Amino acid sequence: MNKQITTLWFIILAILFTACSSLRQAELASGNDPEKALDEVTQIQADALRDQVDVLADELFQKGSIYLADAKRSDTSEAILENAAIAKAFFEDARELAEARKPMASRILTARKSALLAGVRNNRTLIQSMNEIDDDLKSETKQFSRPLSPEDFSELQKKYLLLEAKAVQFRELNEAKIAISNAIEDDAEDLAPKSLRTASLDYQTAMNIIAQSPRSPNIYKKSVQDALASATQLFDVMNVIKGAKGTPEHIAVQIVKQKRALGELTTSLKSAKQTLQEKEGELKRTEGVLKSQKEQLARASTQVRFQQAMDEARREIPQRDALVYQQGNKLIFRLKRINFKSGTAFIPESSKPLIAKVDAIIKKLDAEKVIVQGHTDSVGSAEVNKRLSKERALAVANYLFSLRGGYKITYAGYGESHPIASNETAAGRATNRRVDLVVTVKK
């Protein structure tokens, strides 16, 4: 066991060292097709979720998911491919770490997988519960570096089994629950108390039977059917009463029976679900108004932060070294004097204080993401310039990473394709040789 733990820590350290030293990009099997690249990495993420990599190597998996989300939001093919390649690399590292950690928790992961197969991810409340149990699992195993004690295993297994039962209950009985909730909201306790009581009792009976035998549909199937039938009856009775106010419940029940006999009753639990969805739609519209107001406040707050950052940059950094300006909802730091030696991508020691000053300002911004963009003049071949600009962008990205700013960093090299001055003059070419830091702040 000690040898196994030593090997595990060696793998962990190796992966973490690789992740910190640079942003590795994996080779995409889909080549240079952005749409296929997204499909490829999305499938890799789905496979990782199926194999529970998200809990076994959560930090690396989350980083991969963030870069995949960035790829899906990117508006250029180059950015999509770059973010997808980085995401794939993180998912590959996560899988390698997960395979090393799996022996420490293989039996408890079986219980967790059963909960997943029952449909935990179909309900936000259940997802939150699983996350809490996962945190306990990681804590008790110290990030899967040691096996669970028998007592901890028993406790966690009970929690995952209970979660599995709740997932089955949600899957089988949620429509009945919606119908009963709608009826109560419409005052069924006074208008149709007998129908409500029957539906509630049948629903609770089915819930209890599922709780006892969540993996045995043959045992709980009949009770689920009864619960759904009673909930449908309640819904139909309430519809009759609401359609003709003052109708007694026993009369409404007779009308429902007659309509069913004549084949005229078309309402169902789907209608109840639709009613709930309409109410949720109204709530979402209200939330949309509040969100819009919140976004306006966030934009104002961002503008204040941007202005403070620009003022500080102009005080602390000479314009001959760097410029700072706002571009839409992003802040651009244009580094003009990195002083790379011709044809190289090594940052001179004399230029590092400039990057550190910019990093200090970015930290105060509460930045979420920084894209390091490398640019060159038009001297030399376009292919060489593109490669050199990418290497220089990577060098600056790595140096920023070493300063531990707390924000996400990506990079891109554009070569000579984005000039901001004429390449016909020495001054223009000097202006085009630059590194831009594109900063996005947290909202």
Image (cartoon, rainbow, N blue to C red):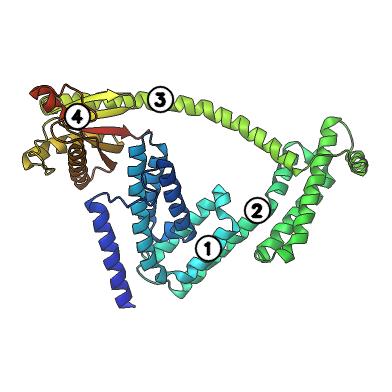
Q: Disc 4 to disc 3, how far (Cα)?
A: 28 Å
Residue type, label 2: Arg
Q: Residue 334 carries which label?
A: 4
Tag 2 residue:
171
- Rendered view: 421 above or below 272: above
Nearest to N terminus: mark 2 or mark 4: 2
Q: In which quarter of the image is residue 55?
A: bottom left
Question: Is 334 in front, or is 173?
Answer: 334
The image shows residue 330, relative to residue 57, as above or below, that is: above
Which of the marked residues, 2 or 1, is nearer the chain's N terminus? 1
What residue is drawn where x is 84% and y is 40%?
Answer: 237
In the rendered view, tell whether residue 257 sits above or below residue 132: above
Q: In which quarter of the image is residue 300?
A: top left
Q: Where is residue 69 in the image (x, y as percent from the top left)?
A: 41, 42
322 w.r.t. 250: above or below: above
Q: Residue at x 40, y 25 (%)?
A: 297
Are dots 2 and 3 in contact, CB under 8 Å? no
Marks 1/4: CA distance? 49 Å
**Residue 188 spot, x, y in % from top left:** 79, 40
As drawn, the label of residue 113 is 1
**Label 3, on which residue?**
297
Q: What element carries label 1?
A: helix
Q: For residue 135, say whether it is visible.
A: no
| Dot placed on the residue nearer the N-terminal end, 2 or 3 | 2
